Image (cartoon, grey):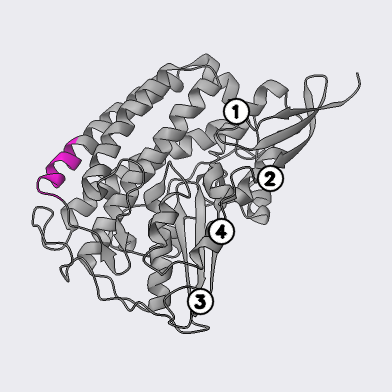
Amino acid sequence: MAEMWISMGPQHPMTHGLWTLKVKIDGETIVDTIPDLGYIHRGVEKICEARDFTQITPYCDRLCYASANTWSHSYVYAAENLLEVEVPERAEYIRLIAVELQRIASHLMWLGAYCPDIGNLTAFVYCLREREMMLDLLQELGGSRMHYNFPRIGGVKRDLPHGFAMRCRAKVKLFLERIHEYEALLDESTIFLIRTQGVGYAKPEEMVNHGVTGPNLRAGGVNYDVRWAHPYSVYDELDWIPSVERSSVKGADCYDRYRVRLDEMKTSADLVLQALDGIPGGADTYHEPGDPALLGKAPSRASDGQTGFHHFEDPRGESLFYIVGGGDARGKNPYRVSIRSPMFITIPYAAKCMIGYKIADVPAIMGSFDPCIGETDR
């Protein structure tokens, strides 16, 4: 049978965003792939050169609709490194709570979208049910359900609202009870196991060489988590370990990538509960916006040649911001902002993991890597 190229996307249920996967098939077997990105490139890095350091934060919220809080926090840490700002400890605890709630919401969005790809619509309803609880809590912090604009250079926009700790504990504990429903629904499903186990192997050494990070790498048994390897915020003050799967000799399959994210949600929930218990001054006290306990004083200017850098554990891997000051005569704008998206690195590698499998396996394999095209194209 003659080989032929087929195009999946840019508007295709498998793609989870506007991008194209070109697949070369021999009958039903995949023999080559070419990912084609750039359909929603917005030039965020260039736009940042015409904004001051504070105005850039909302743009970072829009890098990924499923994990907005993590991207704005990632930028803020790099800006604080550039401007040499000391962040109050209470603000760091609040940041951790916000980021880990966002990580849970992001993984729920991934699992909810992934399961219908391989024939399980019920899990989508379950995941969106719990995600709404996380969005309720994030809305209390930032005032929005998607683009929060919550972190500030030097701290956070506002303190935990009155009664937030009680509501947060109740919802997180309920989530920890309900996550067992996911395991019962999926781990005992013959269809789910057939579609994920032994499909889409990714070798740990290949992922390291390609620069793949985050849950996709830890699914292969590599214990690398930025929060653990290069601690920032107050992660080193809490009791936790990264979620790592023991993959087979062949590497990590789709099921391993599912399991590591499921375990990571449990870890994030535990981190939130620990942070609520350990926050300086107590989770039930309240400080007005701008209070020194919430916001450190930050300079608004960076001199020419001054640089800032920070890598951050995004739900999809290691994100990174590199900022160069001196973008205008006043020093209020950056000269250059460079963003490392974990998915920009991962998608080309994930596409190669499909070779040798069937065309019906494409949604299962690509979906298991949790692609987000917003952060990929930037």
On screen, residue 122 versus residue 177, left or right, reads right
Residue type marked 3: Gly
Residue type marked 2: Pro
- Of badges 1 and 3, the one in the foreground is 3
Q: Distance from label 1 to label 3 (Cα)?
A: 41 Å
Position of residue 280 measured from the top left corner of the image (x, y, whole percent)? 15, 63
Residue type marked 4: Arg
Please tell me which of labels 1 and 4 falls first in the chain.
1
* Mark 4 closeness class: few <14, some 14–19, many ≥20 residues within 10 Å: some
Q: Distance from label 2 to label 3 (Cα)?
A: 33 Å
- Of badges 2 and 3, the one in the foreground is 3
Which residue is disc 4 drawn over?
A: 340
Q: Distance from label 1 to label 2 (Cα)?
A: 15 Å
Helix, strand or loop under label 3: loop
Circle 1/circle 2 CB separation < 8 Å: no
Can you see residue 198? no
Please tell me which of labels 1 and 2 falls first in the chain.
1
Which residue is disc 2 drawn over?
A: 348
Which residue is disc 1 drawn over?
A: 14
Which residue is disc 3 drawn over?
A: 327
Please tell me which of labels 2 and 3 falls first in the chain.
3
* Mark 3 closeness class: few <14, some 14–19, many ≥20 residues within 10 Å: many
Q: Residue at 40% of width from left, 34% of height from top?
A: 108
Can you see residue 275? yes
Q: Nearer the viewer, residue 263 or 292?
A: 292
- Of badges 1 and 2, the one in the foreground is 1
Q: Residue at 50% of width from left, 46% of height from top?
A: 316
- Of badges 3 and 4, the one in the foreground is 3
